[in-house]
Amino acid sequence: MKYDYLIVGSGLFGSIFAYEAHKKGKKCLIIDKRSHIAGNIYTENIDGINVHKYGAHIFHTSNQEVWNYICKFAEFNRYTNSPVAIYKNELYNLPFNMNTFNKLWGVITPEEAKEKIEEEKKQYGIKEPKNLEEQAISLAGKTIYEKLVKGYTEKQWGKKATELPNFIIKRLPVRFTYDNNYFNDKYQGIPIGGYTKIIEKMLEGIEVRLNTDFFDDRKEFENIAEKIVFTGPIDKYYDYKFGELEYRSLRFETQELNIENYQGNAVVNFTEYEVPYTRIIEHKHFEYGLSLGNIAEGKAKNKTIITKEFPDTWETGKEPYYPINNEKNDNLYNKYKDLANKDNKVIFGGRLGQYKYFDMDKVILEALNFAKQELK
């Protein structure tokens, strides 16, 4: 055995594990089928703008341990996530707050807003929601549902809201304050210089092979290390023995525009069904904020880069982004997990290995816990 650990995937989970193992003197090899490190948090600098190649990634956490850990690898700016939504040329603040309610109904006080929402909820009297539509109306009333939830959700999942299970929307963030900060977490920001630099620092001194697919030479890779840390799809690792897990995918269209400022915000959601994309990201606002006066004179001054994000049906060969954690898929995943629990050769981690959508801070915590248990 040439290595102690073969780590499949150079995203956040795999890179943290490799960093922790390397600190303990373990010899690691990272392989990644993509042409770059950092997985889905990869950022590419184009003319002074750090472009989030796989969708918006905004770091947020209330966990002091996680914040201290990630700050070893980057300095974070003070970016605050305050997305806006457009519905039929009307602009609304997100998450749903007093600014939203004022625009919807002209209400000014929290009491007025609560009364309006309760009035709509009572009108439908839904006691036991049977689908997503009923769940959303029972939480926030019909106006919010129809303008800001329905179209966006149906695009996201590729199904009518009446066909989607109610558990997808367990709660809706309804706030009775004039606060557009999307996250409640204590710490929030974007790493200065982009996310790729974080992974570069983690992987210093560790052998990395890009454009290398584990499944193209599986026998060699299975025998190259004492153990495998696998961050790809768990069902593919076991050759789909029990069947394929399901996902939703995404498609991105990125454009460079010769203007200083396209939409005035990093993230704008489009909530009507007829608009095929769910959101437009304007990357420069993640680091320069709304005050464009902060932009240094140079290439970024009169240029911006936007990305339109299209939900997509997933099939083999497409990138799996969102696990579909319904009862059928969770039961299937548990079969693979039982198999993995008996397998002493491999550790599964991350969004695909654990078949669960993780925010970045949760990935860090998972990876640190796995590393602590494995390397003790």
Image (cartoon, helix red, strand yellow):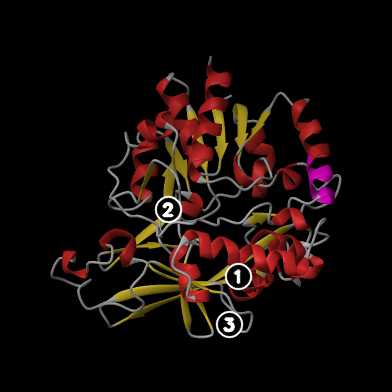
Q: Are marks 2 and 1 in contact (CB under 8 Å)?
A: no
Q: In the rendered image of this protein, does residue 217 appear above or below residue 67?
A: below
Q: Secondary structure at mark 1?
A: helix
Q: Is residue 329 magenta?
A: yes
In the image, 350: left or right of 184? Answer: right
The residue sitting at 50% across, 51% down in the picture is: 39
Distance from the alpha carbon under mark 1 to that under mark 3: 18 Å
The residue under label 3 is 275
In the image, 69: left or right of 141? Answer: left
Q: Quadrant of residue 19?
A: top left
N-terminal of the two: label 2 or label 1?
A: 2
Q: In the rendered image of this protein, does residue 352 appear above or below residue 340?
A: below
Q: Secondary structure at mark 3?
A: loop
Q: In the rendered image of this protein, does residue 81 appear above or below residue 290?
A: above
The residue under label 1 is 144
Amino acid type at mark 2 = Ile
The residue sitting at 58% across, 20% down in the picture is: 374
